Image (cartoon, rainbow, N blue to C red):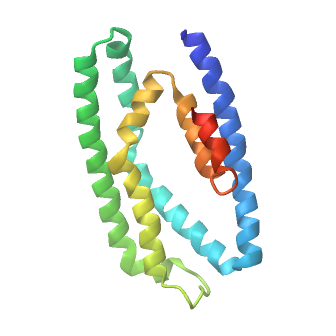
Amino acid sequence: MSRTQNSSRNIIWGVFANLITTAFPFVIRTVIIYNLGELYLGLSSLFTSVLNVLNLTELGFQTAIIYNMYKPLSENDTDTVCALLNFYRKCYRIIGIIVLSMGLLLLPFLEYFISGDYPPDINIYVVYLIFLMNTVSGYFLFAYLKSLLSANQRTDLTSKANICTTLSHIHIRRCRRLVE
């Protein structure tokens, strides 16, 4: 496909994915408030905010990756692309280790981040560790491959995947057809 077609497709799916991922959290928050209460929602927001700060460790590294991959991709230089992906995978693993380490260092101080009460029937440390592992797993698994899709102008695939994961509780069969 041409670059124009790729860009058009990326824009359409990107806008649709942003609409879904922006609107759907409001629905989830409403359900959580009515079913579990405000305390659970507050913990979720707190842990998400703390981990978003830790994600700043990346410092725009992905943009630099994508910039360096344009030329080898346009020249079909697969050896260079493979070498770059190998290097990026190592870099993302280092970033993942840093985020994991910083997240674990914050573990003893969790109670100081929480003002007020939290649900007595849950262990906030276990919940935080689940949030941390969810964040860190992206760095260890496929973050470097996402940059390959961006450099290839195929972010529509990541947009479709984001839509599917956001709506997975509702329509799993429809999402399978969407990605195919």
Q: Quadrant of residue 69?
A: top left
Q: Nearer the viewer, residue 112 or 146?
A: 146
Which residue appears at 63% of the width and 22% of the height?
Answer: 9
Which residue appears at 28% of the width and 22% of the height?
Answer: 81
- Please tell me whether residue 35 is drawn above or below residue 135 in the rendered image: below
Which residue appears at 43% of the width and 50% of the height?
Answer: 56
The answer to whether 94 appears left or right of 120 in the picture is left
Furthest toward the bottom, the residue is 120
Residue 94 percent coordinates (x, y)? 26, 49
The answer to whether 153 appears left or right of 80 in the picture is right
The answer to whether 88 appears left or right of 168 in the picture is left
Image quarter hosting the N terminus: top right
Residue 110 percent coordinates (x, y)? 45, 78
Image quarter hosting the C terminus: top right
Q: Quadrant of residue 87?
A: top left
Which residue appears at 35% of the width and 47% of the height?
Answer: 141
Q: How many numbered markers are drawn?
A: 0
The answer to whether 162 appears left or right of 130 in the picture is right
- Please tell me whether residue 40 is drawn above or below residue 144 in the rendered image: below
Residue 155 percent coordinates (x, y)? 53, 29
- Please tell me whether residue 135 is drawn above or below residue 145 in the rendered image: below
Q: Quadrant of residue 142?
A: top left
Residue 79 percent coordinates (x, y)? 22, 19
